Amino acid sequence: MDSLLKELYKQGTALFEEGKYSEAEPFLKDVIRINPGYADVLNKLGVIAYLKSELEEAAEYLEKALRLNPRYTEASLNLAITYNEMNEFKKAQDVFSKAAQIAHPTPQAADPFIAGKFANEHYRLGNMYMDFGMTEEAIEEYRKALRLNDGFADVRTKLGVALRNKKLFDEAVTELTRAKELNPDFGPAWVQLGLTYYTQGLTGLAIEEWEAALRHMPGLKEARTYLKLVKEKEQS
C-alpha cells in the first residue's frame, strides 16, 4: 500500500468508526478508485449507501465485497439486510443461509447464528441511525433486533432512549423497565429510566430510580451525578 492510499484508508476508516459517515465517504471512494480490491472498504461504502437509502448502490458495493471475499460475514449480513429492504426476500434468505453455512456448517448451529448475527446488525444500524439523528429509523432497527432476540438489555435501553427522544414516554418507560428486569446489573437502563421520568417532570420518580440504582450499584457514577444535579436544583 503506497503512502497516499494508506493515508486515505486510514482517514476514511477512522471517520467511519467515529460515526462520521458523510465525511468518511469521499476518502473511502478515493481508496476504491485507486485500488478496487478492498472488501472492507466496499462494505463500509455499502453501509453508508444503505443509511442514505441508496439501496441499489449499497447492494452493488456489498456484492463487490463478497466477490472479493465470499467468506466476509459482515458484508453478507449487510447485503441480506439491504436485499430485505429492497423486497428481494429470496436473495436476502440465500445470502443469509450461505453466510450461516460458511460460519457453522452444521444445521443445528445455523438458526441461532443467523438470528444472533441479524440482531447484532440491526442493533448496529440502529446506532448509526441515532448518530445521524434519524430516530424513527433507529427505533425500527432496534425493534427488528428484538424480534430476533428479545433478551438484550442494551438494545432495549437504546430503544427506550430513542422512544423518549420521540416523546413516546410510556413506551420508553416500558422498554427501560424491561431492560432492568433482563439485566439488573446493566447500569444504563437505570440511569436512562431516571432521565425519562425527569424529562416528563416526574422528579420524585427520577430521584427514586437513581437512589435505587446506587443502592444496587454504588459505583454507578452517572446516577450519582444526576442525583446530585437534581437535588441541587431543587434546593436553589
Image (cartoon, helix red, strand yellow):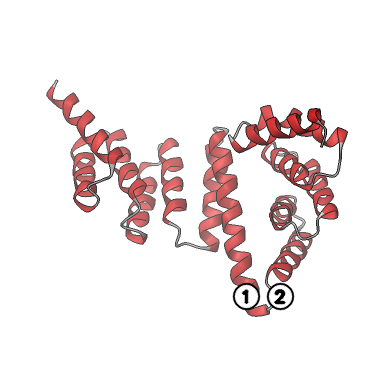
**Disc 1 residue type?**
Ala
| Mark 1: few/some/many CA within 10 Å (<14, 14-19, 20+) | few
Q: How many marks?
A: 2
Q: Quadrant of the C terminus?
A: top left
Q: Residue at x 52, y 53 (%)?
A: 143
Q: Nearer the viewer, residue 152 or 40?
A: 40
Q: Residue at x 33, y 48 (%)?
A: 187
Q: Quick one: SS at disc 1?
A: helix
Q: Position of residue 228 (x, y in %)?
A: 20, 32
Residue behind mark 2 = 105
Q: Nearer the viewer, residue 32 or 125?
A: 32
Q: Position of residue 71 (x, y in %)?
A: 76, 60
Q: Nearer the viewer, residue 76 or 122?
A: 76
Q: Position of residue 13 (x, y in %)?
A: 68, 36
Position above or below: 207 against 100: above
Q: Along the horizontal axis of the image, is 45 left or right of 179?
A: right
Q: Residue at x 84, y 52 (%)?
A: 68
Q: Which quadrant of the structure image shows residue 167?
A: top left
Q: Which quadrant of the structure image shows residue 102?
A: bottom right
Q: Position of residue 31 (x, y in %)?
A: 80, 34
Residue behind mark 1 = 109
Q: Which mark is residue 60?
A: none
Q: CA distance from mark 1 to mark 2?
A: 8 Å
**Disc 2 residue type?**
Pro
Q: Along the horizontal axis of the image, is 57 left or right of 218?
A: right
| Mark 2: few/some/many CA within 10 Å (<14, 14-19, 20+) | few
Q: Residue at x 60, y 46 (%)?
A: 125
Task: Determine whether label 1 and label 2 are within 8 Å by CB.
Answer: yes
Q: Along the horizontal axis of the image, is 95 left or right of 172?
A: right
Q: Quadrant of the N terminus?
A: top right
Q: Quick one: SS at disc 2?
A: loop
